[in-house]
Structure formats: C-alpha cells, structure tokens
Amino acid sequence: MDLHEHKQTHTKMNSWWLNDAKGIPLSRVCDDCIEAVKKTYRPEVLGECGRYEDVVEEQIEPDDHGGQSYYDSGYDY
Ligand SMILES: [Zn+2]
C-alpha cells in the first residue's frame, strides 16, 4: 500500500486522527491503514510501551510561569 497516496482518499467520514501518547495528532488513519501507519512510529511515541520521553527529544516547557496570584489575596482589609 502506498500510504501517501492512500491518505488522499481519507475523508472526515472514513478516517480519524491517530494521536501520540501526549495527545498530539500524528496522522489521519482509517481501518485500512492504521496498522501500517502505526509501524512508521515507535511504540514509545504511541504510548504502547516504553517511555515517550526516551524517544522524543522535543522539549516542552512546563507552563508554570505567571501563576503567581498571591497579590490578589490579603490586600482587601
Ligand atoms: Zn487509511
């Protein structure tokens, strides 16, 4: 199966997004090609085994900045 060509046949009705372990969309898949598409990704990326962090280098900054709202409390009396 030529995956690239096959994917042109996907529509909203017959396919859906395959997500990685973090819920990031990887590719449109359908029943016919999901197994073939999964083989192009590491099982760690799909969350099927191992650790996602071991195979994905991309650094995602934790969004814990700007959460300092303590100024809002205790100033009203
Ligand atoms: Zn397909």
Image (cartoon, rainbow, N blue to C red):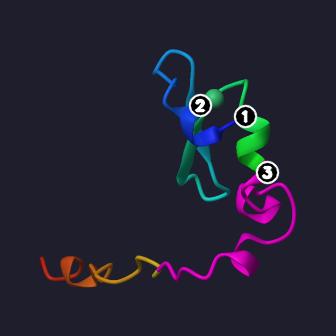
Taking the spot 76% from the left edge, 57% from the top edge, the residue there is: 47
**Image quadrant where one finds the N terminus:** top right
- Asked whether mark 3 and ligand 1 are closer than 8 Å, the reply comes as no
Side (left or right) of 49 relative to 56 = right
Q: Are marks 2 and 1 in contact (CB under 8 Å)?
A: yes
Toward which corner of the image does residue 30 lie, by quadrant? top right
Which range of residues does the magenta coloring cover? 39-60
Tell me the tag on residue 19: none
Among the two numbered marks 3 and 1 on one chain, the one whose residue lies closer to the N terminus: 1
Q: Position of residue 70 (x, y in %)?
A: 28, 83
- Element at label 3: helix
Vertical comparison of 57 with 21: above or below:
below
Return the residue at label 3. Answer: 39
Among the two numbered marks 3 and 2 on one chain, the one whose residue lies closer to the N terminus: 2
Toward which corner of the image does residue 52 lie, by quadrant? bottom right
Vertical comparison of 43 with 12: above or below:
below
Tell me the tag on residue 6: 2
Q: Are marks 3 and 1 in contact (CB under 8 Å)?
A: no
Taking the spot 72% from the left edge, 76% from the top edge, the residue there is: 55
Vertical comparison of 42 with 37: above or below:
below
Vertical comparison of 31 with 70: above or below:
above
Q: Tell me the CA gap for discs 3 and 2.
A: 15 Å
Task: Report ligand 1 position as a quadrant.
Answer: top right
Q: Nearer the viewer, residue 71 or 6?
A: 6
| Mark 1 neighbour class, 10 Å CA radius: few under 14, some 14 to 19, many 20 or more | few
Q: Tell me the CA gap for discs 3 and 1.
A: 13 Å
Magenta segment includes 16: no
